[in-house]
Image (cartoon, rainbow, N blue to C red):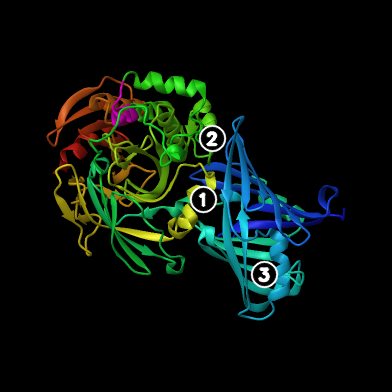
Amino acid sequence: MEPASEKWFVITIADKPVGYSHERVVMGAAGSDTILSASDTKMVLNRLGAKVELRMLSSYEETKDGLLIKVGYEMQASLLSTKTEAVIKGQTIEIRSQAGGKSYTRTLNFTGTLLGPEGIRQISQKRLRNPGDVVEFQTFVAELDAVSKGSRKVLARETLKIAGKDVPELKVEEVIEATAGKGTAWLDDEFEAVKQEMPTPFGTAQVILTDREQALAAASGEELPAEMYATSIIRSNIRVPKARSLEYLKVRLVHRKPELGWPEIKSPYQTVLSKSADSLILEIRRPKPSEKAAGLPVAMNENNKQFLLPNAYIQSDMPELQALARTIIGSEKDTLKAALKLERWVTENMKFDLGIVLAPSSEIFKNRRGTCVGYATLLAALTRAVGIPSRIVMGYVYVLGMFGGHAWTEIWIGESWIPIDAAIVAQEVADAGRLYFIASSLYEGAGSLAGGGAGQQVFGQVDIKILEYAGLDGKKVAVPESGRPYGVNGDLYANQWLGLELLKPPDSGFAKLDSVWPETTVAVIEGPKGEKIELQEHYLLPWKAPQDSAREILDRLNIPGKAREQKVSGRPAIILEAKTKAAMVIIDKPEAWVLIAEGNDAPKWLARAAAGLKLL
């Protein structure tokens, strides 16, 4: 066995170091005439102030000619890791996935030949010389659990400074069709990459050859990198009223990188009205479940079995999870009503944890923590446990003045997929304030949530403008091109979309009028002596009595005293007052408006703000 060649790389995103990659190649691995390429990648990111760690280990075993024999992949994006082993046997790949102490096996057929990293290097060495030269190949993408075609095209010959020295390199464009993205690589005289660039939702990622010390320092976690997830948030042109009751939404998406293309949108409740290279107009209608739905459990067939069977991430075969799911739904046989009972349980029992990227349902079920993906995964497992076909979808959701990347659950009722969402809850079926691009049963692994590259095509790459919307009354409201999010005229703040006006005292000023999620702030009034009044917008859970939700909001503010009730702008309000802090919650179901006053004589300032608040 020949000694291993070893390289270290530093990973940057938007020119900020976030991690490393350590690559090793061993000739004659395991005492055979094979080549083993192994990669260890670690990234440390900052998600809205929470530390996120990702670890990916991959290995490719090839023949001396570069034909793939076996692929291994391990990802740790939570407390537990998930492992995949793919063994190529003729024109079949046997894929075994492990997570949470459980193992699942499936097979994947393909045609042609599969090359590994060494095989791709060899054909590049043979065929790439001058600008315009192209080499094509087929490989197995470990992180996607998918066979994919790929290509390399010579763009130019350039000189890079590597370790302080000018080194001539071959600059090539790299395409892996499964990811739908174009990357760039600089190859040395052995046709091995010394630098790579690829687009991400958070900016351009670079992988650059360096030494071990610098590579490890980039992922030490000692200094958390600058916030990146905020760059993927898309501010909306207006704030939508009662967003969780939206029945209809029309939006225009404008592509920042049209060369990435648009994903294919397959949804019964989304319609593409027009599409060009850089613009897409999409219409979303809140779906209505079919009355032809069968009782529970739904009979399994070839069309729905991947949405009913357990897999490495949706482990619906856990006995304790199955027992809980049956207890929650009781004797309910109506598919939607049963699913909504499960949705409520997930909402009430899960806690957001931004440090967890992706975890199997067994871990989520045990720890009850996760992001929206965790909520969607656990709800999918619970629904499958009682015989409801389910899948996870990813896209954008409107929340508090912005569109953000989001995941939710869809269930099959009658003849169509119906969205439900335990993380951002609506009354029954999920509202129309969401754009769906990717759907997966996760049967094919976590990589299937990349949707054949749909994620790279849209996440962090588009702007979204609201053109029209309608609430429960069905009345459509058009948003003109010249429409502003709000207006300030002297002492009056007016937001025609939210249907509110706020008159400030003459001796004060407005601030923070452009906040978006995760802040709930709509406007702030600042007094002459440091007084502050904040107007917030809150969504209410549909199954809770509004007064109970109002009191919970007030409880979190830790204001001493006894609550009292009154009417504000014709709506019921609950008030708590102390000398330096006072607050009121105005119930405008399915929302609540919260006024918080801080500073000397807070009750007086709260009363002045309430008198100047008009809800239309």
Q: Secondary structure at mark 1?
A: loop
Q: Residue at x 64, y 45 (%)?
A: 221
Whether residue 291 is visible: yes
Q: Secondary structure at mark 2?
A: loop
Q: Secondary structure at mark 3?
A: strand
Instruction: Judge depth for marks 1 and 2 and give the one in front.
Output: 2
Q: Is residue 310 above or below residue 34?
A: above
Question: Mark 1 or 2 closer to N-term?
Answer: 1
Q: Secondary structure of the magenta portion, mostly?
A: helix
Q: Residues within 10 Å of mark 1 (few under 14, many from 20)?
A: some
Q: How far separated are the C-alphas under marks 1 and 3?
A: 28 Å
Residue range corresponding to the magenta coloring? 332-340
**What residue type is disc 1 on?**
Glu
**What residue type is disc 2 on?**
Pro
- Which is more toward the observer, 28 or 246? 28
User: Which residue is most to the left?
Assistant: 570
Instruction: Judge depth for marks 1 and 3 and give the one in front.
Output: 3
Question: Mark 2 or 3 closer to N-term?
Answer: 3
**Image quadrant of residue 35?**
bottom right
Q: Magenta stretch containing residue 155, yes or no?
A: no
Q: Residues within 10 Å of mark 3 (few under 14, many from 20)?
A: many
Q: Residue at x 46, y 65 (%)?
A: 260
Q: Residue at x 19, y 37 (%)?
A: 610
Residue for badge 3? 186
Question: Mark 1 or 3 closer to N-term?
Answer: 3
**What residue type is disc 3 on?**
Trp
The reply, left or right, for residue 413 in relation to residue 311 is left
Whether residue 528 is visible: no
Disc 2 and disc 3 in contact, CB within 8 angstroms: no
> What is the number of the mark on residue 360?
2
Q: How far separated are the C-alphas under marks 2 and 3?
A: 37 Å
Residue for badge 1? 227
